Amino acid sequence: MSAELIASKNVVCVKPGTPIVDVAKLMAQRSIGFLVVSSDCERDLAGVVSERDIIRALASGLQLSEPVDAIMTRRVIYVHRNAPIWEIAYLMREHKIRHVVVTDGDKIFGIISIRDLLRESEVIKRLAEYAEERIDEISAYD
């Protein structure tokens, strides 16, 4: 199973320079916890912002009138739309993140959240099978 099968294609974007308060309002209105920062919501992936980023900004005393650029993550973890699901789960665990951007070449294709992975029973089954294969490989060296 590949990323494109479970990725949400309704990517919510804000432009660089958008005030943090507007980003927080948009997240609340859409009931989302993650969005892309892009000038065109198609190819320009400037960064991403999560609920955690907003909370950290508040905790540090940053003004909500500041631009989203001040808190966005610039080093975006992304996968190609053909990436296997196990790779996405691995990246989420490795980087301690809950969302991954999915691309198609140089275009933004969608977003996968940890909830998307958990919703897919087939995904869970394949991840378990992959883990069993890895355990078998490791056991073979003992």
Image (tube, helix red, strand yellow):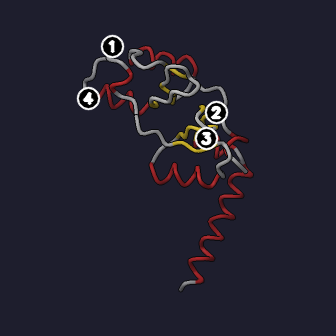
Q: Which mark is residue 65?
A: 1
| Eye-nearest disc, 3 or 2 | 2
Residue 110 image-quadrant placement: top right
Residue at 66%, 42% in the rendered image: 81
**First-in-chain label (1 vs 2):** 1
How far is disc 4 from disc 2 in space, using C-alphas?
33 Å
**First-in-chain label (4 vs 2):** 4
Q: Which mark is residue 115?
A: 3
| Label 4: element kind | loop
As rendered, which of 106 and 27 lies closer to the eye?
A: 106
Q: Residues within 10 Å of mark 2 (few under 14, many from 20)?
A: many
Q: Which mark is residue 44?
A: none
- Give the x, y percent position of residue 131: 62, 65
How far is disc 4 from disc 3 in space, using C-alphas?
28 Å
Q: Residues within 10 Å of mark 1 (few under 14, many from 20)?
A: few
As rendered, which of 120 and 105 lies closer to the eye?
A: 105
- Give the x, y percent position of residue 113: 58, 39
Question: Is residue 49 shown to the viewer in this render?
Answer: no
Residue annotated with mark 4: 60
Q: State the residue lying farthest toward the left.
A: 61
Of the residues shown, which amino acid type is indicated by label 3?
Arg
